[in-house]
């Protein structure tokens, strides 16, 4: 559904991506992780056609995103970090923009707003950043687009809304859809995403499914002051250490996104070696 | 190139909605301002102004002043970070987006301004007549009382030409589209005037010196030359000014939009 091959991109003379490859299949919620400036937003913008790669080929749902064909755009919804909210009521916003999306579900939108506790008659420009984000997220989910791309969707959401949002996404995804989410707040993606893409040093250094990660890596906690042995990475937490090690026959543990990300960044080649097998 | 009438109509609906409040606000401000001016002129008994110069002064101000400011702002979304993503991700082609903005600013906007001015002139006339017996001449579109002054219809033709200029300006400039377009127009006219004078100076130095000295040109043009300049050349220049020039700029604006969307 999304196929990027040998993508090269840079701002001015500074290269951001060189020979980047990425393939995503329908029916998944994929998290894009990376440090500041790693290129998460840029990657998303290339996929939706807001930025054009300097070389390589990109094909999304059979379209070249850079052509911005209206049929392609009506099946892609992008939630940027910086939102555009025109001065109008939410209900008006829906009546003006929903007709562009043939699979738009009005019921889903109004239910989403109810869950987020945003009034259907409120004026967009009068809402706080978090509330605007809730409207746009509810709208994005209601479009039922095949590709829903969200850049830092949980930024600005309060704690109950983050959990609400996770539930809504899990409920909403269909077999023919991809949700692509970038975030700094990796914990917000826990128990939600089924594959992870990690960007670092101009390339994708990790792209795996959650069950595969659970099978290959073990996430544990050891009490006490001594750092556990034979581990890939450990982090001191109150009362002990949270650690990651190779899964050598242990049962499959729950993936801790934050420590996984740090492990990948610090042990890039070792992690790649483990997952090559 | 792709054009779908349903998407175009949806974009028009968006444009109407986008412009509704600012247009209403601008029009009301203009009507209030003009009413104040008319009342003030009545108080200081500027009958000359009320009787003859009112429409000649204010109609172009409304049409060009208000109209061109609004034309300049029509691609503002494309020039802000948040608006740009929103504009580009709207499921419609470049042609549909271009034509929807063109239709609003080229057809709806001048129509709205002219109708508003008609209504304003009528109401103002009634008010002044009832309160003080002074009558401002009724607003006529194709004629006025002065032979040498342009009619509202002439101003509309000038609006069409300037629409093309400011439409291109609204796509080209990221901020302060209206003053920047004005400045560029002024600089271009300055350069053209300078080049024209240099050409005359180089090729017709005697003519240049005599004209500078305020004397009669050293030669009388022949009758055929006068005929040519007053009829054929004048028609060519008018056609170029009113049709070719805006057409070229609208086409340039379309290609500039494609470039800007990339």
Image: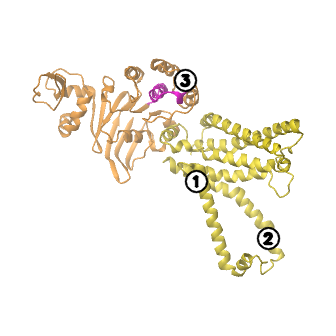
Q: Chain ID for label 1?
A: B
On the rendered image, what quadrant is the C terminus of chain A found in? top left
In this view, the residue in front, B106 or B94, is B106
On the rendered image, what quadrant is the N terminus of chain A found in? top left
Provide residue A192's location: percent of width, then percent of height: 33, 24
Q: Is residue A136 left or right of residue B229?
A: left
Provide the residue designation for mark 1: B180
Tag 1–tag 2 contact (CB < 8 Å)? no
Please check the rendered image and state whether residue A181 is part of the magenta-colored stretch, yes or no.
no
Q: Give the residue at the far right of this rendering.
A: B133
Q: At 90% from the left edge and 39% from the top edge, which residue is drawn? A: B133
Provide residue B124's location: percent of width, then percent of height: 81, 38
Provide residue A220's location: percent of width, then percent of height: 18, 23
Magenta stretch?
Answer: A123-146
Gap in angstroms between the C-alphas marked 1 and 2: 37 Å
Badge 1 or badge 2: first in the primary sequence: 1
Please check the rendered image and state whether residue A139 is part of the magenta-colored stretch, yes or no.
yes
Is the residue at mark 1 from the same chain as the one at mark 2? yes
Q: Is residue A15 left or right of residue A65?
A: left
In this view, the residue in front, A167 or B47, is B47
Gap in angstroms between the C-alphas marked 2 and 3: 66 Å
**Does the rendering let one see residue B253?**
no
- The secondary element bearing badge 1 is classed as helix
Q: Chain ID for label 2?
A: B
Q: Say few, some or many: other residues with alpha carbon within 10 Å of mark 3 (under 14 / 14 to 19 / 20 or more).
A: some
- Residue B41 disc label: none
A191, above or below B47, in the image:
above
Q: Say few, some or many: other residues with alpha carbon within 10 Å of mark 1 (under 14 / 14 to 19 / 20 or more).
A: some
- Residue B228 disc label: 2
A56, above or below A34, in the image:
below
Q: Say few, some or many: other residues with alpha carbon within 10 Å of mark 2 (under 14 / 14 to 19 / 20 or more).
A: few
Provide the residue designation for mark 3: A122
């Amino acid at each position: 559904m999304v196929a990027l091959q040998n993508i090269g991109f840079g701002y001015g003379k500074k290269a951001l991506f060189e020979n980047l490859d990425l393939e995503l299949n329908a029916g998944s919620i994929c998290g894009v992780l990376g440090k500041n400036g790693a290129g998460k937003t840029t990657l998303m913008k290339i996929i939706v056609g807001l930025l054009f790669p300097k070389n390589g080929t990109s094909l999304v749902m059979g379209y070249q995103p850079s052509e911005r064909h209206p049929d392609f755009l009506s099946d892609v919804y992008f939630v940027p970090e910086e939102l555009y909210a025109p001065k109008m009521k939410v209900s008006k916003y829906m009546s003006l923009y929903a007709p562009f999306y043939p699979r738009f579900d009005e019921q889903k939108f109004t239910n989403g707003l109810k869950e987020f506790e945003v009034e259907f008659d409120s004026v967009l420009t009068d809402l706080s950043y978090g509330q605007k984000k809730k409207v746009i997220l509810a709208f994005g989910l209601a479009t039922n687009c095949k590709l829903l791309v969200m850049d830092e969707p949980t930024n600005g959401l309060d704690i109950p809304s983050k959990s609400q949002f996770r539930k809504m996404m899990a409920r909403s995804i269909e077999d023919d859809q991809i949700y692509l989410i970038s975030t700094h707040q990796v914990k917000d993606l826990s128990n939600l995403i089924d594959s992870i893409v990690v960007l670092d040093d101009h390339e994708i250094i990790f792209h795996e499914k959650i069950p595969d990660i659970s099978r290959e890596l073990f996430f544990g906690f050891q009490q006490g002051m001594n750092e556990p042995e034979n581990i890939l990475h450990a982090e001191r937490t109150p009362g002990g250490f949270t650690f990651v090690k190779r899964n050598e026959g242990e049962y499959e543990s729950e993936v801790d996104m934050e420590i996984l990300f740090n492990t990948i960044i610090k042990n890039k080649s070792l992690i790649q070696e483990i997952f090559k097998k | 190139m792709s054009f779908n009438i349903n998407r175009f109509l949806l974009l028009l609906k968006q444009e109407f909605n986008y412009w509704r409040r600012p247009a209403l606000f601008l029009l009301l401000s203009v009507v209030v301002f003009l009413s104040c001016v008319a009342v003030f002129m009545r108080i200081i008994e500027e009958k000359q102004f009320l009787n003859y110069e009112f429409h000649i002064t204010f109609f172009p101000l409304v049409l060009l002043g208000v109209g061109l400011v609004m034309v300049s702002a029509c691609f503002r979304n494309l020039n802000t970070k948040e608006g740009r993503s929103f504009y580009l991700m709207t499921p419609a082609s470049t042609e549909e987006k271009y034509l929807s903005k063109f239709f609003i600013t080229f057809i709806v906007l001048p129509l709205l301004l002219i109708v508003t001015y008609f209504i304003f002139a009528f109401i103002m006339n009634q008010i002044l007549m009832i309160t003080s017996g002074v009558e401002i001449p009724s607003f006529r579109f194709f004629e006025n009382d002065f032979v040498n002054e342009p009619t509202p219809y002439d101003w509309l033709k000038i609006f069409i030409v300037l629409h093309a200029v400011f439409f291109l300006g609204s796509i080209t400039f990221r901020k302060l589209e209206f003053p920047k377009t004005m400045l560029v127009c002024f600089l271009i006219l300055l350069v053209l005037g300078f080049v024209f004078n240099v050409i005359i100076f180089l090729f017709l130095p005697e003519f240049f010196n005599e004209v500078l000295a305020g004397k009669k040109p050293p030669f009388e043009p022949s009758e055929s030359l006068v005929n040519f300049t007053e009829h054929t050349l004048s028609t060519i220049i008018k056609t170029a000014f009113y049709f070719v020039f805006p057409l070229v700029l609208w086409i340039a604006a379309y290609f500039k939009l494609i470039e800007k969307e990339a």
